[in-house]
Amino acid sequence: IVTVQIGFVKSDRVLCSLDSGLPCFIERNDVSDLQDFRRLDEKVKVGMVIHARVLEIRRDTFEARLTCKTTELQDHVRWEYPVMQTLM
């Protein structure tokens, strides 16, 4: 689980960064379990600080794909293996 600050909200993804400066993004489907919103800026705003989980690290573009779905942030969800595969 990481803490990120929202930097920009696009129509299909949210752009953010880790404290280390690593650029990250959250795709529309990974913002919330409930897709009960029309626009992403109805769920997140620029400057918000949120908790997220790393889904993938893209070494070729030096960025990380995150999720902030409640179900993905729960401790019982196993997530280490897919992330570790992207590092190899």
Image (cartoon, grey):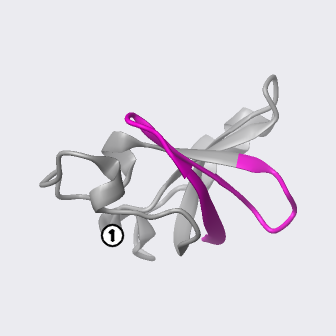
Residue 50 pos. (x, y %): 53, 73
Q: Is residue 84 magenta?
A: no
Q: Nearer the viewer, residue 19 or 2?
A: 19
Q: Nearer the viewer, residue 64 or 76?
A: 64
Q: Is residue 14 magenta?
A: yes
Q: Is residue 36 left or right of residue 74?
A: left
Q: Quadrant of the N terminus?
A: bottom right
Q: Is residue 79 above or below residue 63?
A: below
User: Which residue is at a point 74% across and 39% down the rendered structure image?
Assistant: 63
- Label the magenta part by its dominant secondary structure: strand
Q: Is residue 25 left or right of residue 32?
A: right
Quadrant of res 49: bottom right
- Image mark count: 1
Q: Is residue 84 left or right of residue 78?
A: right
Quadrant of res 76: bottom left
Q: Label 1: which residue?
A: 70
- In the image, farthest residue toward the top: 60
Quadrant of res 42: bottom left
Q: Residues within 10 Å of mark 1 (few under 14, many from 20)?
A: some
Over which residues does the magenta segment extend? 1-23
Residue 13 pos. (x, y %): 46, 40
Q: Secondary structure at mark 1?
A: helix
The amino acid type, in three-letter code, at marker 1 is: Thr
Residue 38 pos. (x, y %): 17, 45
Q: Is residue 42 left or right of residue 52?
A: left
User: Which residue is at a point 12% across and 55% down the rendered structure image?
Assistant: 36
- In the image, farthest residue toward the left: 36
User: Which residue is at a point 69% across and 36% down the rendered structure image?
Assistant: 85
- In the image, farthest residue toward the right: 20
Q: Quadrant of the C terminus?
A: top right
